[in-house]
Image (tube, rainbow, N blue to C red):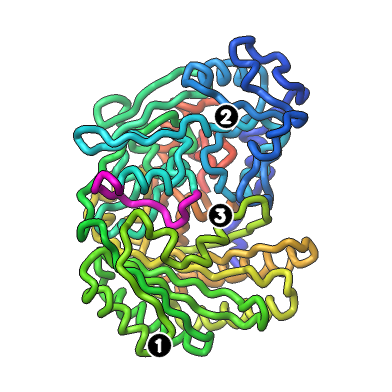
Amino acid sequence: MLDSMFFRLLPALALLGGRASSAPVDGYNWPPSIAGEAHGPSWPQFANATLRWSTYAAPTFNEVFIPQTEEDLSTALRYLSSSNKTWLAQSGGHGYSATLQTIQNAVLINMESFDYVKVNPNMTVTVGTGVKFDELISVVGNAGRELTVGFCPGVGAMGATLGGGLGRLEGLHGLTSDALLSVRMALWNGTIIEASETVNPDLLWGLRGAGQNFGIVIEALFQTYPATNGGLQYSSDLIFSADKLEAVMNVTNSLLTPQLDPALAIATSISPDPTTFKPAITVNIVYPGPLEKGQAFRKLYSAISSNYTEQMVPWTNLTSVALPAVEAGTLIKGNPHDQYSVLTKNLPVANLREAVDALGTLAQQYPGANESTIFIETFGQKALSDLPANYSAFPHRDTFRNAIVFSVTYSDAAVASAANSWAMSMRDKFAQSEVSGYDKLQIYQNYAHGDEPLSALYGYEEWRHERLTALKNSYDPHGFFNGFHAVPNKLSDWS
């Protein structure tokens, strides 16, 4: 356990961002020009408009506001910030950090109306903050372009970007946030501002990795890249029984030595069988290159098991092909999902064996937890490490080789304690330096549970703390955006 490290308690977050909310009456006290866009629980669409991916440690809402224009959003923020109300902005609704439970009886600002994607003549792309990754992929891919996007198609593109934005193409193009050129956003008091390399450049730096701390992004401009291999990508899914774990992980580790091919992406999912409850391993290989090169990587794994599929698929269709069963599960909203994660240098085989065996025992003892999963993302890193360490607020350019997520999903609350304990204990085990391979704990912010030291998410360097805290004080001095891994307003509060 990391008792000495994991001391950032949720009650402290409540003190940072807590505000009382007024009575949940449709349009109650809202400015007349936008009152029709504010709704209480009696509105027939209220439940759907406030639905989130995870109900674990979730925020709660007694009003929802759906702005139609940036002027609506500006007016609403002026009203909310002067009315002592709590709010949370939502694009995809997939953020699951336990820090969100500090937001209770709040106003949800649902940004679904800002759902537009436009490829510009210079091949940049303008993206509204309500856009999901699948929509972005469709428009950009059909223009013969690409950029790094997240693994799950239903995730809000902007929310993922603001935390960094990992994805299968990151070895070639960097993070989604690395392609972020400019944003138009609303501050806590309704002021609309822009950030780019020439206008508020320090804010743009912070938005690339810590962006949920400063305001609500309305739209953003991204760089895109010519489609690799004509837009066709090799994809192969391979299935292994749990007794093949060591052999499978040894192959992946060999590919990580010294560094993964920049174009290669490997996603590994380990889940109990729904009938036998015995864990099974699925490895997905994606390579945006010739069939023969993709097959060369596949053959390293298919020497262990001949149970595989393979095909060349357009990038626009990849999310419906690669690991389809995993993708289908990620699209379901409204269930409790509790996740703990850690970044590792390589894949510690002995510790993974312990984790997989413990997952099988959990599923056998508590069948209601049999949708729990160990998920590993192993993506190329060259484009990340080619950028200087101070390029953006994202701090993991040299520690992003493997993201390991211990995820529990259950419908029976009776299994919650055992399932959550398994996930947390595994995170704590893998967080130890002799297991992770890093001398300090490294956590990808979008995957953080919320109990980790802030430095594990944002970096340990003092200059990072100083720069982020200065930005927080400039753009959110009263802590209106403190619900999701809040950057402290005081340097002494960094953990």
Which mark is nearer the camera, 1 or 2?
1
Q: Quadrant of the N terminus?
A: bottom right
Residue with the mark numbered 3: 331
Q: Amino acid at mark 2?
A: Phe
Q: Secondary structure at mark 3?
A: loop
Q: Secondary structure at mark 1?
A: loop
- Determine the residue positioned at 38% across, 26% down: 184
Based on the picture, tell me whether residue 63 belongs to the magenta stretch.
Answer: no
Q: Residues in magenta?
A: 141-154
Q: Amino acid at mark 3?
A: Leu
Left or right? Give the position of 366 relative to 468. Answer: right
Measured from the top left, where is residue 33 in percent x and y? 59, 11
Residue 189 visible, this angle:
no
Query: Disc number at residue 480?
Result: 2
First in sequence, mark 1 or 3: give its number: 1
Query: Disc number at residue 306?
Result: 1
